[in-house]
């Protein structure tokens, strides 16, 4: 049996928090690439990989290059989900090395967040939002939120956190077929757009005032 199949078997019945906790136990190197993280997750699901990649955005911890690399990886995975094809990633994304000493604490804190979400997950709620063609739409929504993650606004408070939460809720909601979480993801996207619009309006007003 391949490593991917073994990972799939060991992760198959685990909750989101248990998957990340198990993954932490396998991280025994000084750095990891996106490709290696996906291989360690096995066939647990591309959506779970997306959820994993949102965790660094939930906390004020700086991991150089994560915003662009993880944002693009999430976008490409979501594209594959929407089109029903295997994910493809350019080498500079798939092989980018991430410092394990910085990544592990983020994932450890993420486990506690995911435990709270695990407690409120209810499969088959609002089934219309996780059935049929809606999953293609959900994939597009994850792509859009990932694009928002990639905007160069890292120093602006919550600019990464809000779209990161949107991806997390959408990914977990679709993977666990909980339409209420999916709805929460869409609401978070709307909130992100409102927030970014306010920022843009504030910047425009300030520049107009300065230019008088």
Image: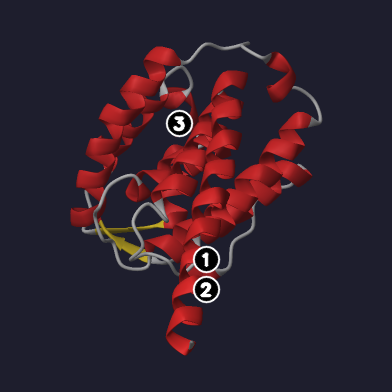
Q: At which x and y percent is residue 30?
A: 21, 58
Q: At which x and y percent is residue 26?
A: 28, 40
Which of the marked residues, 3 or 1, is nearer the chain's N terminus?
3
* Picture residue at 37% right of the left edge, 29% below the top: 19
Q: At which x and y percent is residue 62?
A: 26, 61
Give the number of the disc on residue 200.
1
User: In whole angstroms, how far apart are the C-alphas of marks 1 and 2?
Assistant: 6 Å
Where disc 2 sits, the SS reads helix
Most foreground residue, 128 or 171: 128
User: In whole angstroms, how far apart are the C-alphas of marks 3 and 1?
Assistant: 48 Å
* Picture residue at 76% right of the left edge, 42% below the top: 84
Is the residue marked by circle 2 packed among few (<14), some (14-19), or many (20+) residues within 10 Å? few
Placement of 206 over or under 139, stated as above or below? below
Give the number of the disc on residue 204.
2
* Residue under label 3: 6
Q: At which x and y percent is residue 82?
A: 74, 43
Left or right: 190, with 53 as reference point: right
Is the residue marked by circle 1 packed among few (<14), some (14-19), or many (20+) residues within 10 Å? few
Left or right: 27, with 171 as reference point: left
Q: Nearer the viewer, mark 3 or mark 1?
A: 1
Most foreground residue, 7 or 17: 17
């Amino acid at each position: 049996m391949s490593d991917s199949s073994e990972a799939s078997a060991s992760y198959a019945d685990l909750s989101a928090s248990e998957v990340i906790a198990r993954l932490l136990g396998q991280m025994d190197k000084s750095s990891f690439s996106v490709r290696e993280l996906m291989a360690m997750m096995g066939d647990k699901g591309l959506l779970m990989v997306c959820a994993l990649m949102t965790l660094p955005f939930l906390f004020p911890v700086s991991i150089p290059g994560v915003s662009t690399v993880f944002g693009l990886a999430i976008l490409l995975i979501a594209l594959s989900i929407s089109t029903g094809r295997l994910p493809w990633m350019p080498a500079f994304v798939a092989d980018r090395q991430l410092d394990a000493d910085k990544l592990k604490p983020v994932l450890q804190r993420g486990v506690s967040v995911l435990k709270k979400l695990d407690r409120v997950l209810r499969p088959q709620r609002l089934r219309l939002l996780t059935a049929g063609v809606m999953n293609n739409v959900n994939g597009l929504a994850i792509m859009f939120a990932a694009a928002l993650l990639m905007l160069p606004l890292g120093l602006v408070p919550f600019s990464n956190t809000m779209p990161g939460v949107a991806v997390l809720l959408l990914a977990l909601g679709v993977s666990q077929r909980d339409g209420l979480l999916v709805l929460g993801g869409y609401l978070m996207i709307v909130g992100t757009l409102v927030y970014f619009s306010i920022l843009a309006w504030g910047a425009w007003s300030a520049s107009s005032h300065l230019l008088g």
